[in-house]
Amino acid sequence: GAVVSQHPSWVICKSGTSVKIECRSLDFQATTMFWYRQFPKQSLMLMATSNEGSKATYEQGVEKDKFLINHASLTLSTLTVTSAHPEDSSFYICSASKQGFPDTQYFGPGTRLTVL
Amino acid sequence: AQKITQTQPGMFVQEKEAVTLDCTYDTSDQSYGLFWYKQPSSGEMIFLIYQGSYDEQNATEGRYSLNFQKARKSANLVISASQLGDSAMYFCAMRETPNQAGTALIFGKGTTLSVSS
């Protein structure tokens, strides 16, 4: 199988603080990981594409200085929400493609962020 | 223009009945992949079924089948013999250039399926 984990599964923080979310591929190497954001009852919107060892590619309208993405290894990508505000409250989901299996994309369980 | 269109915000079906969730897509690529995911209230995205643009046969996975009509650019999901546990949000998604693992999925707005006993 191919398992992707996220940590934490939920987090509550005060406005102005930074929050780091980890995405790990547990049993495979992922050269590319993706970060999505989902508001309640809405679709998943791609925020950025993260490639191991290089800078992330952000979608239009996503502030790269606010949502810092680091893909330090083939199994770990992190998303840091800097100076979080209540409007950043959302469900953040990562996914990873398995090398040699481009037809699939494995999703993490998501992280629910609430900014007070 | 939307790349993935799901026109049914909500669908209701009784247990053991079949249900079709609609999905149309828009792409100029000849090579692409179509996916269906299920998202229960827990939030996890569960992969259901995949159809490649060059696949001649409709994909099937257990109770799930994909009614792929390439000329109409539709990829409807058919769930046979609905179960209470099928109640969830269902997303249709597309990956253009499916041979490149570095391409993200584009999602539709989703359809909420409610199964009653």
Image (cartoon, coloured by chain):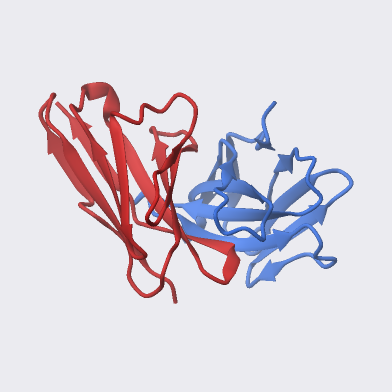
Chain colours: A red, B blue
Picture layout, residue B50 above or below residue A87: below
Q: Is residue A66 visible?
A: yes
Q: In which quarter of the image is residue A29?
A: bottom left
Which of the image's four quarters has the C terminus of chain A? top left
| Along the viewing direction, whichever of A36 and B91 lies nearer the viewer | A36
Residue at 41% in and 43% down: A56
Q: Is residue A16 left or right of residue A75?
A: left
Residue furthest toward the right? Answer: B71
Residue at 37% in and 47% down: A93
Picture layout, residue A3 above or below residue A7: below
| Along the viewing direction, whichever of A31 and B87 lies nearer the viewer | A31
Residue furthest toward the front? Answer: A54
Q: Quadrant of residue A7?
A: bottom left
Q: In this view, does B67 lie to the left or right of A94?
A: right
| Along the viewing direction, whichever of A79 and A15 lies nearer the viewer | A79
Q: Can residue B18 be seen in this view?
A: no
Picture layout, residue B1 above or below residue B20: above
Numbered-mark total: 0
Residue A21 image position (x, y, % from top left): 24, 47
Residue A59 image position (x, y, % from top left): 48, 33
Residue at 24% in and 40% down: A80
Residue B92 image position (x, y, % from top left): 61, 47
Which of the image's four quarters has the N terminus of chain A? bottom left
| Along the viewing direction, whichever of A86 and A40 lies nearer the viewer | A86
Q: In this view, does A62 lie to the left or right of B57?
A: left
Picture layout, residue B62 above or below residue B79: below
